Amino acid sequence: DTGVSQNPRHKITKRGQNVTFRCDPISEHNRLYWYRQTLGQGPEFLTYFQNEAQLEKSRLLSDRFSAERPKGSFSTLEIQRTEQGDSAMYLCASSFRGSGEAFFGQGTRLTVV
Amino acid sequence: DAKTTQPNSMESNEEEPVHLPCNHSTISGTDYIHWYRQLPSQGPEYVIHGLTSNVNNRMASLAIAEDRKSSTLILHRATLRDAAVYYCILKIQVISNFGNEKLTFGTGTRLTIIP
């Protein structure tokens, strides 16, 4: 296993379009997180999955955002009707309960033009 | 989540030790001190974590003050590859099987290594 994988690495989209990102966590990790990072800031928590159950969503996750983790494996993050303010790096992380360590992917950089 | 305070930036010479400070005066007894770093164009990377005692691993050492209100990440011999933003994060240990172990990042310390 080579770690957390995110695709695509870069995405440029026009305002109003829908985009979907994929995250493949480390296979034995049951916890999966999505974060968003804007320039000069640290990552901000968006949502958390324990296996296939989405257990917490941040207030940052507006109704245009939806995340899924079918069968508790990979996860997708969809943004509908993108806005310029959605431009950011979207990071996925996975962990195993009690390990004390989260593993992050390299992120998907979204640019909305 | 309790907050941490870190300098915005630091510089260090290559092959010298680096001491990155973090203040967390409102830390609670159940907060673990975690350090992550983020290299340019990469996701954050776990460095080390501890509760009360000093900790060592292959990447770094973590020195925790006796009152736990501050800590210091020590890179023993900095290389150019250590240039990154270093984040000090307090995280409550989650006991529940379903507890959220999310990380609350600040703006971190940008470490520049001078060749």
Image (cartoon, helix red, strand yellow):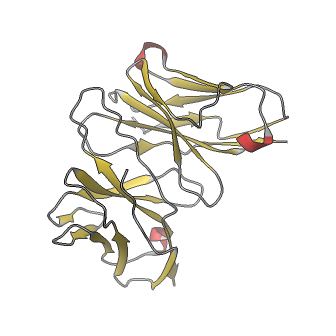
Residue A3 location (% of width, % of height): 43, 39
Asked if residue A85 lies left or right of residue A55, the reply is: right
Residue B110 location (% of width, % of height): 52, 71
Asked if residue B68 lies left or right of residue A57, the reply is: left
Q: Which residue lies furthest to the top in this view?
A: A71
Asked if residue A77 lies left or right of residue A104, the reply is: right
Position of A34 relative to A50 (above/below)? below
Pick the front one: A84 or A100:
A84
Residue A44 location (% of width, % of height): 53, 46
Pick the front one: B25 or B18:
B25
Residue A73 location (% of width, % of height): 43, 21
Position of B114 relative to A87 (above/below)? below
Q: Residue furthest front?
A: B26
Position of A37 relative to B35 (above/below)? above
Pick the front one: B100 or B1:
B1
Pick the front one: B21 or A109:
B21
Q: How many numbered circles are shown?
A: 0
The residue located at (23%, 62%) in the rendering is: B57
The residue located at (35%, 70%) in the rendering is: B23
